[in-house]
Image: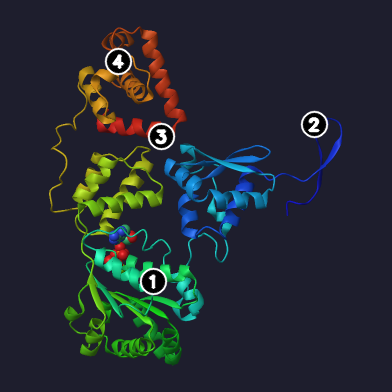
């Protein structure tokens, strides 16, 4: 489309002459085309995760600079996808030789017109959220790609002592479906990672692209589908579909309890696949024996392979999961906040993730970094019985009293010493907190420039004023700075 020729008056070096030119792609169009091309080589989930809010922010004759919102995204793009990005860029514009990456936090904010918008990738396999097609209309080919969530992989499942066996069994099954443990039966409480493992198996097999038919289905949908096909006198279609599977992944089989017709049908499907050496993996919230209301013959089938459980992970594993989830989202959260969440959430991994997501969302809304206190406030709302551990009672949760108190708490917040803050050091790590303290003393606590100057080792008032202005400017220009500033303000109740 952009190859149409146009005449334009070139007022550059050739002023006064008409030049015949191919219109150039603007930066945004260029980046959209590159990312579109990348879809052939980079997984959809990775594009969604790491290319969100990115833009071409600089371009010269033979190079482009990609702006990314976080340091984590920069690392990913430059380390993991640089080759693919460079190749795609050269395809779109052969003059491009090199690609550089730069962090620009303001890209993260919605409405930054430079940043990529995945809406341009509409269409069947576009990056927009996919609607679930009605089950009965789905062919097996589409069926699996629609159902399995590509984000759940065996690689990003964090392994700890409480789920190691389940993960190892899942990996063995994914490596050689039908050979190792058949069926594999994974059980555990809500939000422990059963679905993640199950879909991880499916993704691993599909990624290897060996044309095996992988079917993932929840027991509930299996039942609904069966009822529908019976009603429409198409029970044969149903049989055919499931018997085409090389790998059958059935989630939450406790749902089969007391559903006799479903059990009957599933029993035949199970046997047919099993006899043909196809892999079957099942999950449930209880071990097979405890599935009261399930036919004994099914229970004994479920037990004949390998039965493993996933339990609530220990502290270290929970912390590792939080780090993994932050990483996947390209978010940087202070480690002590993650530790606080890991320590206090003790119900399910899903809740763990929920608290994290909430913390991220809240802080985006308030444009501040999540703090232990902001997370604590959220935890208190989720009527929990256990006391919150990790911080002392609200001792430090009072408004700042005076300059000494202010400097002490600013120092604590930024993990520097009071002496540092009062020192003349110009290192950003120290100068930034000092300037913020000065700003707050002046603007929020009403101290005069002279008073502040005297407190900070006899500086004159123009130096103090300079600090105040500096903070104002940085708050405006640097979103990350603003977040830290807002988090500090909240923390010290100013
Ligand atoms: P279940 O099916 O057991 O109820 P899910 O598999 O849906 O639980 O897990 C809930 C959430 O917790 C998912 O987002 C999943 O990715 C996450 N999760 C659970 N366990 C782990 C783990 N060990 N590593 C990474 N993420 C996990
Ligand atoms: Mg589940």
Residue lying at 38% horizontally and 79% vertically, measured from the top left? 248
Q: How far apart are the alpha carbons under marks 2 and 4?
A: 55 Å
319 displayed left or right of 120: left
Instruction: State the SS at label 4.
Output: loop
Residue 53 point in image, percent of width and height:
50, 46
The foreground one among 146 and 492 is 146
In the rendered structure, which disc, 4 or 1, sits on the residue that comes first in sequence?
1
Residue 483 point in image, percent of width and height:
37, 34
**Quarter holding the C terminus?**
top left
Q: How far apart are the alpha carbons under marks 3 and 4?
A: 24 Å
In the rendered structure, which disc, 2 or 4, sits on the residue that comes first in sequence?
2
Instruction: State the SS at label 2.
Output: loop
- Above or below, 23 against 475 in this view is below
Tag 1–tag 2 contact (CB < 8 Å):
no
Tag 3–tag 4 contact (CB < 8 Å):
no
Residue tagged 1: 175
Q: How far apart are the alpha carbons under marks 1 and 2?
A: 63 Å
Residue lying at 21% horizontally and 79% vertically, measured from the top left? 288
Residue tagged 4: 423
Residue tagged 2: 11
Residue tagged 3: 480
Local crowd at mark 3 within 10 Å, few (<14), some, or many (≥20)?
A: some
Local crowd at mark 4 within 10 Å, few (<14), some, or many (≥20)?
A: some
Instruction: Determine if residue 151 is in view.
Output: yes
In the rendered structure, which disc, 2 or 3, sits on the residue that comes first in sequence?
2
């Amino acid at each position: 489309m952009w190859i149409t020729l146009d005449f334009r008056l070139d007022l550059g070096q050739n002023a006064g002459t008409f030049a015949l030119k191919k219109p150039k792609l603007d930066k945004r169009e260029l980046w959209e085309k590159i990312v579109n091309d990348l879809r052939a080589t980079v997984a959809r989930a990775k594009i969604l995760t790491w290319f969100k809010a990115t833009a071409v922010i600089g371009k010269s004759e033979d190079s482009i600079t990609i702006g990314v919102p976080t340091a984590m995204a920069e690392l990913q793009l430059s380390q993991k996808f640089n080759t693919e990005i460079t190749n795609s860029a050269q395809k779109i514009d052969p003059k491009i030789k090199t690609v550089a990456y730069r962090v620009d936090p303001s890209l993260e904010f919605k409405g930054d017109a430079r940043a990529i918008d995945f809406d341009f990738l509409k269409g069947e396999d576009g990056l927009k959220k996919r609607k679930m097609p009605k089950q009965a209309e789905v062919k097996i080919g589409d069926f699996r790609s629609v159902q399995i969530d590509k984000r759940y992989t065996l690689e990003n499942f964090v392994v700890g002592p409480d789920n190691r066996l389940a993960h190892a069994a899942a990996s063995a099954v994914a490596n050689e479906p039908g050979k190792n443990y058949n069926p594999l039966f994974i059980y555990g409480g809500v939000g422990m990672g059963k679905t993640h493992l199950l879909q991880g198996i499916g993704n691993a097999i599909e990624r290897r692209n060996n044309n095996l038919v992988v079917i993932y289905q929840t027991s509930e949908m299996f039942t609904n589908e069966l009822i529908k096909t019976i009603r429409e006198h198409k029970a044969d279609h149903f049989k055919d579909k499931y018997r085409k599977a090389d790998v059958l992944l059935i989630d939450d089989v406790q749902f089969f309890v007391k559903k006799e017709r479903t059990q009957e049908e599933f029993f035949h499907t199970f046997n047919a696949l099993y006899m043909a050496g196809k892999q079957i993996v099942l999950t449930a919230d209880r071990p097979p024996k405890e599935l009261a209301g399930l036919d004994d013959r099914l229970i004994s089938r479920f037990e004949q392979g390998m039965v493993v459980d996933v339990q609530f992970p220990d502290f270290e594993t929970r912390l590792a999961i939080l780090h993994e989830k932050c990483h996947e989202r390209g978010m940087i959260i202070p480690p002590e906040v993650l530790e606080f969440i890991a320590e206090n959430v003790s119900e399910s991994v899903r809740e763990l993730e929920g608290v994290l997501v909430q913390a991220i969302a809240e802080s985006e809304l308030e444009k501040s970094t999540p703090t232990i206190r902001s997370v604590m406030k959220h935890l208190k709302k989720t009527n929990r019985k256990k006391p919150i551990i990790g911080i002392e009672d609200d001792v430090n949760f009072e408004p700042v009293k005076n300059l000494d108190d202010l400097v002490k708490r600013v120092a604590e917040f930024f993990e520097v010493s009071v002496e540092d803050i009062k020192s003349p050091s110009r290192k950003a790590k120290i100068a930034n907190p000092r300037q913020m303290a000065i700003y707050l003393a002046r603007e929020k606590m009403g101290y005069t420039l002279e008073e502040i100057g005297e407190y900070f080792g006899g500086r004159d008032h123009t130096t103090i004023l300079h600090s105040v202005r500096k903070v104002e400017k940085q708050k405006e220009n640097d979103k990350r700075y603003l977040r830290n500033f807002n988090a500090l303000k909240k923390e010290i109740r100013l």
